[in-house]
Every structure is written in structure tokens, then in C-alpha cells.
Image (tube, helix red, strand yellow):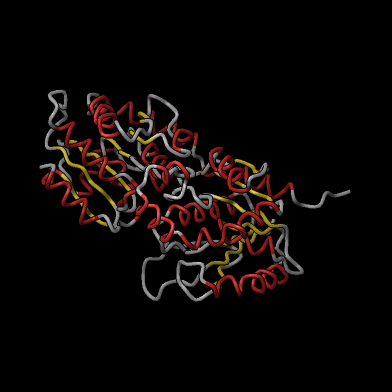
Amino acid sequence: MRVLEICRSLPTHQAGGLEWHAYDLVCGLEEQGARVTVLTTPSPASGGLVELKASGGVHTVGDQPGRYSLRFFRELGDKVAAICASEKIDVIHAQGFAGVPLVLWPKAGFAPIVTTIHGTMFSETPLRSERLASMSFGEQIGARWRYKHRLATLPLWRKFLHAGPHLVVDSQFTRRELALEAKAGIEATVIQLGIDQKRIWARTRFEAREELVLDTDGTIFLVVGRLEPLKGHALALEAMANASMNAAFKVPQPWRLILVGEGPEKQNLMALAKRLNIASHVMFPGRVPSDKLTKMYAAADLFLNPDAGSPAFGLVTAEALLAGTPVIAMDSGATNEVLNSERDGELIPPNESQMVAKWTEGVLRLAARLPEPAKDRFERAERAAKRFDRRDMARSMMNVFQSLMPRKR
């Protein structure tokens, strides 16, 4: 089967979850025998690329590395039609919003189109109704202004959903969200994300710490995500500060909290750590390359995911579990579909009035088990490896593609 895969930033030069998912999917489809041609945005002028072996080659469209620009969408249809003709494409697979113009304005020669939706128009933003309801009037205005492009394109998005596209989603949560945004029933195939096991599950906790030059005797708490209010980093700082002052907090010393990522909240979070008197325990390494991040997952004793933005899947939680690391996470979005075993961690229900207290209690409960026996971590990684298998994801996607092929008589 010949597949045209459309996504921004391939070969991977952005550190986002969508890019790594698309990379894993291309590799998985190739392993299943598909010939994949990639259509993506231009690569940056220098560095940061991860090699991608696509047997059909890599084509580019648009003028901005890593972004769907206006030029990208203007040129997309003609480029897709040309590739379909020259490569004899059997099916087009578009990641995210790239599928919208192809479905709404198809051109002659297009192969059948499948669109995978990871985050809906308002999931992972402050625009979801329950988030807006908790904001002041000024904060609501700010949120609407920041995401004005999404509000402006909402009618187009609904038109796309009503056009009956062949949809794939990575969680039941996303399927429910799409129905709400479309104000209609939605048919979509749920295919849970699969991850390259070799990229994550390759080191023991102690090996990872030695490679990172981290204290192997202390306790490491890890948070990964863009430093912005919705991701909940302030909550993690407050919970850790409260837990560290509790007599029940008897983790191996010294403990440290590593907040991986960049964003507009960095200075505010650094100031908060000082006010909470835990600045000496907190590290802000900024963005880290993927190979270093996988070591950090493995080195951590506990992964914290306080994201209240209703993630459509929660790739960082899956990656932490693949490294064998227990997780405490906000019960928001699709996170409970990823973290669904008490042996793997704990979910904290969102409750604005008691959030810090609930997170402090959760951290104390999980910290009481630390350090975990290597056997427990190994078994957790094995469970995750079975659940988030790239081969299963690719086989399921191939089944969707096959269902669109003309039946032989």
C-alpha cells in the first residue's frame, strides 16, 4: 500500500508530541510493509533534525519550518494531487488540521483521505467552558484574544466535521469532544498512540542518573511541558513545598524537582520557588533534546503531570510509564485512559478549592513508596510496553486504510 503522510516538522525538528507521533507512525507503517511518502513543512536552515527513512521520499510545502502557514494551505491541494498522480498513492493520511482543506476542497486525483485528530479546537486550551467559568472577566477576554484564530475558524471546523470525514482519534475523550464541537454525532475510530519502545525503555534508573550526572542517592521528581499557566507547574511547586514540610516526607535526600520546558511562566515559577523556600531543590533545564529527556524519565522517582488543560491523550504520561516511573496526574482530558492502574500511580480530580491540598496528599502517598524496587519499575514498564506498542498502532491504522480500498470482485 502506498500512503501519503502529511504533518508539520518531519523529519522531526520540533520537540512536540505530534511530531514524534507522526515519526513513530511513519516508521510503524513502513514496518507493516507500506510505502510511505511524507509531505511536510520546510526544514530549518540548521540543525535539529532526526533522520526519517520514508521509502517514498520527503516533500515540502509552504514557507515556514514547523508551521502551517497561509502559503502551506494555498499550495497544499495542488501538491497533494501531484504526489497522488506521480506516486500512485492509495490513501492520504493527514495529521490534525492539515486534513481540513483536503476534505472541504478536494481536487481531482485525490486518494481517499483519513484525518487523525489529536487535540480538538478547544481541548488543551483555556476556552473549554469549565475553564472559562473559573476565570475573571479580564482573564476570559485574554484567553479569547490569545485563541482568536481558533474562534474565527470554528465555523470551518464544524463544516469539516459535518462533511463526514474518515476520522481517527487517539482517545475516547477526543471522540466525545468532537461531538460536542460539531453539535452532532461523530463517527471516528479510536487508535491509541503507540511509541517506539527503544526510544524510551532502554536504561535503568541508576544508569540514566549516571549518564545525566545526577545524584543517585537523592529523590527526583519530574515535570515535562511548556511553562504556561494551564500546565499546572505552580501547583506542582506548591504541592512539593507543602509535602517537604510534612513529617511523613521521608524520601532519600537530597530531593529535587526538575521542570523541563520553556514558556512565558518561567520567571514567575522561579520567583514562586523562592517564595516557597524550595529554590535550591528546583531545576529549570529548559528544553532538552529527546535523547536526554528519555534519560530524565528513567532517572525520575516520580513523574508529576498537573496539566489541567484536558489533554487529548497525554503522551508524556505514557512515556514516563514506559520508563517504569510512577505518575501522579490531574484527572483531566484523556489522562485517565492512559493512567488507569493504581499500580502505575494516582489520578487527582480537579477541584479548584482544594487542589493544592489534594496534590500534597497524593505526593505524600506516592513518596512513601520511594525508592521503588527495581522489580516494580520493570513490571510497570512492561505493562506500558504492551499497551503503547507502535506495531499495534500501525496495524490498526493499516486496517483503517484497507477499509477504504475498493473491494476486488
Q: Is residue 181 left or right of residue 382?
A: right
The picture places residue 162, in percent across and down from the top left corner, at 69, 52
Nearest the eye: 408 or 99: 99
Q: Residue at x 17, y 41 (%)?
A: 256
Direction from residue 324 to residue 68 in the image, left or right: right
Where is residue 235 shown, x and y percent of the image?
27, 40
Q: Position of residue 46 (x, y in %)?
A: 37, 74
Q: Is residue 372 visible?
A: no
Side of 236 where 181 appears, left or right: right
Q: Residue at x 23, y 54 (%)?
A: 285
At 24% across and 39% down in the image, what residue appears?
Answer: 221
Total residue callouts: 0
Quarter residue 242 falls in: top left
Q: Nearer the viewer, residue 160 or 13?
A: 160
Quarter of the image with the N terminus is bottom right
Residue 59 sits in which quadrant? bottom right
Q: Which of 108/26 is in front? A: 108
Q: In this view, which residue lies farthest toward the right?
A: 409
Q: x, y (%) of residue 247?
A: 12, 24
Which residue appears farthest toward the front when viewing the image?
137
Q: Is residue 249 shown to the viewer in this render?
A: yes
